[in-house]
Amino acid sequence: MDLKDIQNLIKFVAKSGASEVKLEMEDIKITIKTTPENYGTETTYVQHVPVTTALPQAPAPQPTAPTAPAVALPSEAAQKDDGKYITIKSPIIGTLYRKPSPDKPAFVEVGSTINKGDVLCIIEAMKLFNEIESEVSGKVVKVLVDDMSPVEFDQPLFLVDPS
């Protein structure tokens, strides 16, 4: 139903003399209330109803508790190559920045040796910049996310070889 159909419906209801009409369709609810002609006003409420379709059930993401300084949590051994790499995942939802500022170099690159506690990146969430620190020592094998990219909770960010 488009705007022209709604306007025609309002005119029809006004001419019919009905004081209130409710119309519910698949994706929209409309309530039209009119008052007697000597008042000269009419009220229309249009409410869009969210359309829900049956989609395959995907596992729901686990809710996160609010965090102050966020720390990356390594997963068990990643299923990459022979499973010797550790995946560092995002602890929060936000925008990932690989550099402390646009004119500075990235915190880590492929081949960088990192120690436990080293800052790997920054994730901005709700105007707060959270430094993501490494929970492991090793060598960065792969950077899985581009600079200034949105990231989800538990999304893999880096692969680290702990040996």
Image (cartoon, rainbow, N blue to C red):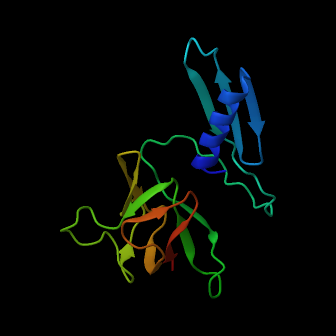
Residue 29 horizontal side relative to residue 133, left or right: right
Residue at the left extreme of this rendering: 103
Q: Nearer the viewer, residue 26 or 140?
A: 26
Quadrant of the image occupied by residue 134: bottom left
For image coordinates 39% across by 67% down, the residue present is 115
Q: Is residue 30 above or below residue 157?
A: above
Q: Is residue 42 above or below residue 138?
A: above
For image coordinates 52% across by 40% down, the residue present is 66
For image coordinates 62% across by 31% down, the residue present is 45
Q: Nearer the viewer, residue 50 or 144?
A: 50
Residue 64 image point, x, y percent: 59, 46
For image coordinates 73% across by 28% down, the residue present is 16
Residue 96 image point, x, y percent: 40, 62
Residue 78 image point, x, y percent: 63, 75
Residue 107 horizontal side relative to residue 6, left or right: left
Q: Nearer the viewer, residue 45 or 41?
A: 41
